[in-house]
Image: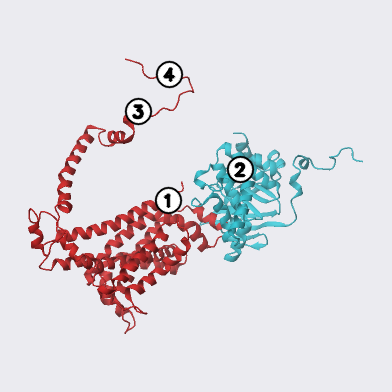
Chain colours: A cyan, B red
Amino acid sequence: MPTSMTEGIAEDEIRHPTKKLTVSEEVAIEMVAVHKWYGEFHVLKDINLTVHKGERIVICGPSGSGKSTLIRCINRLEEHQKGRIVVDGVELTGDLKNIERVRSEVGIVFQSFNLFPHLTVLENCSLAPIWVRRMRRADAEEIAMKYLERVRIPEQALKYPGQLSGGQQQRVAIARSLCMSPRIMLFDEPTSALDPEMIKEVLDVMVELAESGMTMLCVTHEMGFATAVANRVIFMDFGEIIEQNEPHEFFNHPQHDRTKLFLSQILHH
Amino acid sequence: MTDATPTYEVGQHPDLPPPRSEVGVLGWMKHNLFSSPFNVVMTLLGIWFLWWLIPPLFDWIVLDAVWTADSRKECWEKMEVPEGAACWAFIKGRFQLFVYGFYPHALRWRVNLSFVLLIMAIVPVLYDNMPGRKYGLWYAMAFPFIAGWLLVGGFGLTPVDTDQFGGIMLTFVIGVTGISFSLPIGVLLALGRRSKMPVLRILCVMFIEFIRGVPLIALLFIASSMLNFFLPPGTVFDLLIRVLIMVTLFASAYIAEVVRGGLQAIPRGQHEAADALGLTFMKAQALIILPQALKISIPGIVNTFIGLYKDTTLVLIIGMLDPLGIGRASLADAVWAGLAREVYLFVALFFFICCFSMSRYSLYLERKLHTGH
């Protein structure tokens, strides 16, 4: 009989039991030797990344390092010039049909929310299910209300985005992406444009989403969030992936000098 | 000095009404008309100018005007001072001509019916608080064909030669056709000009720049004399149809540029969000981009429409008789010669009523679509 109930289980799993359980062997995203240029500027250099289903990945790094560009390549908001990107079994090429199929399975949340200002919150969320998945309006609105409840703002359904606070708008943006039932969620600095009081309400929604088993790629500076839910933290600088590790190791035992420099700048301000 | 203002505990100050002289009519007058010595002088000058101008003008136009007479001479005899007032009897006598042109007398009920149908078609397009608006919109799309049949005839109705169209009726036909068809064509041109496909883009740019480089009068002359050279021999195109095509194409080029300005104002994030949700290009344009772009462009679009509506008067150069043309033709009549002021005032009033209504509607639309962003 073991001397302790926790003998044989890694310390990390005890603190964050949800972490290892939901990562499967299936590959959600695969990037192989990906390069991207903006004109002459080499913005992504030899990116190799494999993301499994259910994995939560946080990407951090100084500005201009290509983090946003990397995740925007995954749903082809940006095009890569070299290498292969395979999302959910579909390779991203110039073929439009593929792109639209991939985009309806990949949700993205932007730093500047990008809600549609001429539509109500409910219409923002139900638009894609109606026009892309061809649902009936009543069904789409039901799904929209379900997700609005999940992000805890069902009472704002008939308001316009201009009437909401930043934190509420970002939560609507998350609900809007979730209404398409995506398999992968991308977050491009979701809390960077928010007041400190509103950051928490958005992070709570993201943590709850992570705990439900969603595959997530998150570009963020919120290291508390990374520690709480991430399986892996990736550090990028000047277009390259410098280092990646699980959060505890990443923050406490960084390997590269550049990682150490970056961490010292953000953790001690 | 009495201390009339009571003091309150910190945090207990109640909401008080503002002082009388700062709000309401008095407040407005104080701030806008009498706020500085210079403004006081300008206000008094303005009041004097209006007093000098308005009463005599009102007398001339309304109070002393003669409404019934058989000739200019008789009209002026009825006034205290010859030419001292407006002779509206001239317009009254010619009113039918001004409104219907030379449309056959017995068939004018068709013009009246078309006008009623026009109002019925416009209302669901412009106002969306109506029940059954969807049917109204379908009817509005069918309206041009119904009105065309009613006005021109054929298929059971006595045909009327379009040369007999004239007056206010002609202005409405050209104006309404030009406005309703130039907007969708203009939007397509704007989208085409912004397209990444080089052939489409070049074609749209060439069309827009050609139209903008040529005056409307020149295009009307081309329509009236040269268009037949570009078409297969033997095709006889009604002059009115040629004019309608030219006016519509002319306006659509200007609308294209106005809409393109609106499209440029839409932040890239809107395109990205629409793409990221999986919307195709056409759906993204129709649901997300164009509603916002058109809303921003409303002032420019209505401006173009108002200009177009007034430009319809240019058809008098190629021999079609719009209200101004009829007015000038009427002035040639010896019985009534010399009443140019009345004619031009009347035509100006007609255009002012129409254009001002369009302006007001545009403001209503902007206020209605304002969703706080």
Check disc 1 and report the residue beneath it: B368
Residue B7's disc number: 4
**Relative depth, front residue between A173 and A149:** A149
Horizontal relation, residue A164 to residue A55: left or right? left
Q: Is residue A18 above or below residue B282?
A: above
Horizontal relation, residue A62 to residue B105: left or right? right
Query: SS for tag 1?
Result: helix
Residue A241 spot, x, y in % from top left: 64, 50
Indicate which disc, 4 or 1, sits on the residue closer to the N terminus: 4
**Residue at 32%, 75% in the rendered image:** B152
Check disc 2 and report the residue beneath it: A202
The amino acid pointed to by label 3 is: Pro
The amino acid pointed to by label 2 is: Val
Query: SS for tag 2?
Result: helix
Same chain assignment for discs 2 and 3:
no
| Residue at the extreme right | A1
Q: Is residue A112 above or below residue B321?
A: above
Residue A245's disc number: none
Mark 2 vs mark 1, CA separation in Å:
32 Å
| Chain of the residue under label 3 | B
Residue B19's disc number: 3
**Relative depth, front residue between A207 and B81:** B81
| Chain of the residue under label 1 | B
The amino acid pointed to by label 4 is: Thr
Say which quadrant the N terminus of chain B sits in.
top left
Mark 4 vs mark 1, CA separation in Å:
45 Å
Residue B167 spot, x, y in % from top left: 24, 67
Query: SS for tag 3?
Result: loop
Mark 3 vs mark 1, CA separation in Å:
34 Å
Q: Quadrant of residue B23?
A: top left
Q: Is residue B223 visible?
A: yes
